[in-house]
Amino acid sequence: MFMGEYQHNIDEKGRIIIPAKFRQALGETFVMTRGLDHSLFVYPYEEWQKLEAKLKDLPFTKKDARAFTRFFFSGATECELDKQGRVTIVSPLRHYADLKKECVVIGVSNRVEIWSKAIWEKYFAEAEESFSEIAENIVDFDL
């Protein structure tokens, strides 16, 4: 399970350090793709395969299913960490997530997300205001 929030910079070659706590769980090869809210989603290969199976079951006759599947898979790339624990983020993904220098790497249960620090702070501030309401609408247990 991935959890926590870490601040890292992306270098001029598009590399970012993956927190040590996440590296073993990601494994030797993992998948990075466009996420939601202009973030990147990073999945251990096993989790990616589960997600792929679910997306294969979507009806290709539905326009939204085709659009989401295209969006998700066309941005996907297999990744490996270098000896310093960095991953190179390909240019189209850096552009999509607006990754320039300061980034935030967060653990979200079965995946890692990579955000531009500015986009993350804006997203978090907006979500924080409605966190109680969101929890009331989607969570069926006491926190």
Image (cartoon, rainbow, N blue to C red):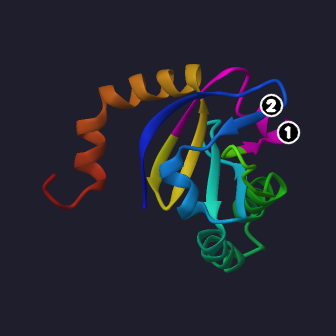
Position of 104 compared to 55: left or right?
Answer: left
- Which amino acid, mark 2? His
Closer to the camera, 83 or 142? 83
Q: Which mark is residue 92?
A: 1
The residue depicted at 73 percent of the width and 45 percent of the height is: 87
Magenta stretch in the rendered image: 87-105
Q: Are marks 1 and 2 in contact (CB under 8 Å)?
A: yes
Position of 74 compared to 109: left or right?
Answer: right
Question: Does residue 28 sit above or below 93 in this rendering?
Answer: below
Closer to the camera, 102 or 92? 102
Closer to the camera, 105 or 54? 105
Position of residue 133 measured from the top left corner of the image (x, y, whole percent): 25, 39
Q: Residues within 10 Å of mark 2 (few under 14, many from 20)?
A: few
Position of residue 46 measured from the top left corner of the image (x, y, whole percent): 62, 74
Image quadrant in which the N terminus is located: bottom left
Residue 40 included in the magenta stretch of the image: no
Quadrant in the rendering for residue 12: top right
Give the Cα separation between the discs numbered 1 and 2.
5 Å
The residue depicted at 71 percent of the width and 53 percent of the height is: 32
Residue bearing the label numbered 2: 95
- Which amino acid, mark 1? Pro
Give the farthest residue toward the left.
Answer: 142
Element under disc 1: helix
Q: Residues within 10 Å of mark 1 (few under 14, many from 20)?
A: few
